[in-house]
Image: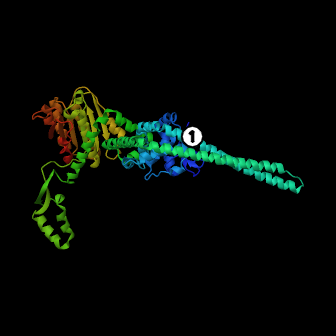
């Protein structure tokens, strides 16, 4: 069990984080709050505790080293103590930490970890292999340092003996004074006391000399070990930086912002990271990230409240499309009459757009096929499922940005469906997103089941909130029939509720051909063959 103790400056130390007598056991200068951050992180991280236990079994001062590695990564401006301030036994740790901090890569690591206790702990764990190598490489120097530590303890004990001898001499002198006043003499006792003081001083001087020599030997041994540490230190920092950045990139790809991460406990964040790293979701991170970036770029190209894609400037009287320089004329009293005249003549400069329908206001519904064939890979190694779900998650972002409800409908055979709702007025939890992304039903394909569910949801939205003009995106790799009766009801609902249907045939060109069922259902239909290409759906994010 690790003991937590308070050093002489009042700073809480983690394992090995205390001040030892006249010297320090940790090399990185830290304030109480930073040491508390280490203590709390250590107590929450099973990985750190296991690593301390493992290393301490072979290297007595490994706990102090891991404390230093954490503080060096966590602090905004880490500073090392002078070697003279360190306990001799900790000189090797000081050299290892110095070797790490001297690498050019260390500044890159701190950009990712400074102020983030979780990321700093992750950096420590990522450096474990290199730390093991460095501790083995410095074993001889550590043995020399421990001899110096033992010599220093003997010197400290000898110094304490001098103090005790002097105190005994003082007590004896007081006793002699009292005895003289009573006419008694104890000269022999005083002589013995003086001799004891002299011997204690000589022993202390000899012990101090031996300690200094041992310390010099230890310092030389550590200095000689330093060149061999540099390569391992660079490898350690590079590996830690890569691990921290990879996890940060994974979180960003899945839409987990820094604010959400800060609200998570250490265990919650660790479990989330493990889930993202070890499940098949990790394979989709790059595609999801690129989809989100593409969608964000397409949103930036849109003109709020305007229809279609911006292609230039034209003349007209549509005030919703007036360019900013025309509106500026309204701010000048002498030009307002000119503006009114041009408006009356239909000669205002307006944004010109290609004729796409206006953006919807009802829910965005992504119907994602999860039949067995969606596992199939295409060019570049991407799967149909990965492309479909990455597109659906980007549509979720699109809906959130527009303050619209989002619904993900996972479907396969007629009796297999799962509906995942993400209301616009409720926060989206990453667990909800991952559950949606991970669900795979298997089986065949039925169009009627998911589209009926989508139509019912839009009907419900219209009844509850009087919202129309929803958007349904059908992502499938198969072609299947629907009944005439169902098609008549579908067309009636579509006319009544004013929703649009966008069809995406993934790896299935026949499903996107003219006259196909998907073509009859869709207002806008496209085919995707390259399952790594996010731009095949770019125009969806300009009109949805």
Q: Secondary structure at mark 1?
A: helix
Compared to residue 275, the image places residue 404 above or below, namely: below
Tell me, yes or no, if residue 343 can be seen here: yes
Tell me, yes or no, if residue 67 can be seen here: no
Instruction: Please say which color scheme the image uses.
Output: rainbow
Q: Position of residue 354 (x, y in %)?
A: 12, 50
Question: Is 159 or 511 nearer to us in this picture?
Answer: 159
- Taking the view exactly as shown, the residue that stands out farthest to the top is 443
Question: Is 189 or 499 nearer to us in this picture?
Answer: 189
Which quarter of the picture shows residue 286? Answer: top left
Q: Position of residue 119 (x, y in %)?
A: 41, 44
Q: Is residue 189 left or right of residue 273?
A: right
Q: Which residue is mark 1?
A: 147
Question: Is 415 or 238 nearer to us in this picture?
Answer: 238
Question: Is 533 or 146 nearer to us in this picture?
Answer: 146
Q: Which quarter of the image is occupied by the N terminus?
A: top right
- Taking the view exactly as shown, the residue that stands out farthest to the right is 183
Q: How many marks?
A: 1
Q: Position of residue 55 (x, y in %)?
A: 49, 35
Compared to residue 459, the image places residue 173 above or below, namely: below
Q: Position of residue 323 (x, y in %)?
A: 17, 61
Q: Residues within 10 Å of mark 1 (few under 14, many from 20)?
A: some
Picture residue at 21% right of the left edge, 39% below the top: 473
């Amino acid at each position: 069990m690790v003991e937590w103790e308070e050093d002489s400056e009042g700073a809480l130390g983690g394992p090995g984080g205390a001040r030892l007598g006249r010297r320090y056991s940790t090399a990185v200068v830290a304030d109480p709050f930073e040491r508390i951050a280490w203590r709390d992180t250590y107590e929450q991280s099973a990985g750190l505790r296991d690593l301390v236990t493992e290393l301490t079994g072979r290297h007595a001062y490994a706990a102090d080293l891991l404390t230093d590695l954490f503080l060096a990564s966590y602090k905004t401006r880490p500073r090392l103590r002078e070697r003279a301030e360190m306990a001799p036994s900790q000189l090797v740790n000081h050299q290892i930490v110095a070797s790490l901090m001297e690498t050019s890569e260390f500044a890159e690591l701190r950009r990712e970890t400074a102020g983030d206790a979780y990321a700093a702990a992750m950096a420590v764990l990522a450096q474990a292999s290199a730390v093991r190598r460095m501790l083995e490489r410095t074993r001889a120097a550590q043995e020399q340092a421990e001899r110096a530590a033992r010599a220093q303890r003997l010197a400290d004990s000898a110094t304490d003996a001098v103090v005790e001898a002097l105190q005994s001499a003082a007590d004896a002198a007081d006793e002699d004074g009292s005895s003289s006043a009573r006419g008694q003499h104890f000269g022999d006792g005083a002589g013995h006391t003086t001799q004891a003081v002299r011997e204690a001083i000589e022993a202390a001087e000899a012990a101090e000399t031996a300690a200094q020599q041992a310390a010099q030997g230890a310092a030389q041994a550590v200095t000689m070990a330093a060149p061999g540490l540099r390569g391992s230190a660079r490898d350690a920092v590079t590996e830690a930086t890569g691990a921290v950045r990879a996890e940060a990139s994974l979180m960003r790809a899945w839409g987990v912002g820094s604010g959400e991460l800060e609200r998570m406990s250490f265990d919650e964040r660790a479990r989330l990271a493990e889930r993202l790293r070890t499940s098949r979701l990790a394979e989709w991170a790059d595609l999801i990230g690129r989809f989100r970036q593409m969608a964000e770029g397409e949103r930036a190209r849109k003109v709020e409240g305007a229809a279609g894609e911006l292609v230039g400037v034209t003349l007209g009287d549509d005030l919703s499309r007036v360019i900013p320089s025309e509106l500026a004329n309204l701010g000048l009293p002498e030009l307002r009459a000119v503006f009114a005249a041009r408006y009356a003549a239909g000669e205002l400069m307006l944004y010109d757009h290609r004729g796409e329908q206006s953006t919807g206001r009802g829910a965005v519904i992504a119907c994602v096929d999860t039949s067995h064939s969606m596992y199939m890979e295409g060019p570049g190694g991407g799967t149909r499922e990965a492309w479909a779900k990455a597109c659906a998650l980007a549509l979720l972002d699109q809906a959130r940005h527009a303050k619209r409800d989002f619904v993900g409908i996972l479907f396969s055979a007629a009796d297999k469906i799962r509906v995942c709702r993400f209301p616009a007025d409720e926060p989206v939890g990453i667990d909800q997103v991952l559950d949606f992304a991970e669900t795979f039903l298997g089986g065949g394909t039925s169009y009627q089941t998911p589209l009926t569910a989508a139509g019912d949801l839009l009907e419900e939205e219209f009844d509850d909130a009087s919202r129309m003009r929803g958007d349904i995106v059908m992502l499938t790799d198969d072609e299947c029939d629907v009944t005439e009766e169902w098609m008549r009801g579908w067309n009636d609902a579509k006319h009544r509720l004013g929703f649009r249907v966008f069809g995406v045939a993934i790896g299935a060109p026949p499903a996107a051909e003219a006259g196909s069922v998907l073509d009859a259902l869709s207002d806008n239909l496209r085919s995707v063959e390259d399952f790594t290409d996010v731009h095949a759906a770019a125009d969806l994010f300009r009109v949805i």
